[in-house]
Image (cartoon, rainbow, N blue to C red):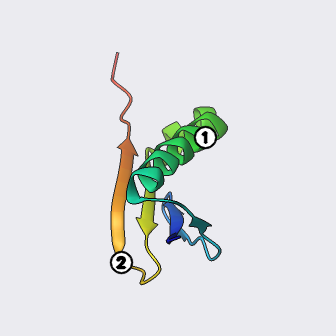
Amino acid sequence: MPRYFFHTENGHLIPDDQGQELASLDAAHAVALDTMGEILRYQGRAFWKTRQFRVIVTDDNQAEVVRLTTCASPSAT
């Protein structure tokens, strides 16, 4: 089974040095979405200070296979 690594970035890179064995690239995409959701829930209001967050998924060869980026800008009201 291939191993995928889920690195995160919010101003600085937080590498995943263990990774997860998953059945397919589709499974890695699903985990990347779950990871992003968990991070945003955990960050809560602090996300507005960072304003950007990434989940970068690489394979065993450290080749990037997917990059999710979320960003926010508060509207001026």
- Tell me the residue at 47%/43% (across/down): 33
Report the side of 71 relative to 10 (left or right).
Answer: left
Q: Helix, strand or loop at disc 1? A: helix
Q: Residue at x 43, y 74 (%)?
A: 59
Q: Is residue 36 found left or right of 68 in the rendered image?
A: right
Specify the amino acid type for callout 2.
Ala
Looking at the image, residue 65 lies above or below residue 61: above
Q: Position of residue 4 (x, y in %)?
A: 50, 68
Q: Which residue is mark 2?
A: 63
**The furthest residue to the top:** 77
- Identified by mark 1, the residue type is Glu
Instruction: Give x and y (percent) for residue 36.
Output: 51, 45
Q: Residues within 10 Å of mark 1 (few under 14, many from 20)?
A: few
Q: Is residue 70 above or below residue 8?
A: above
Q: Looking at the figure, which quarter contains the C terminus?
A: top left
Looking at the picture, tell me which residue is in the foreground, 26 or 70.
26
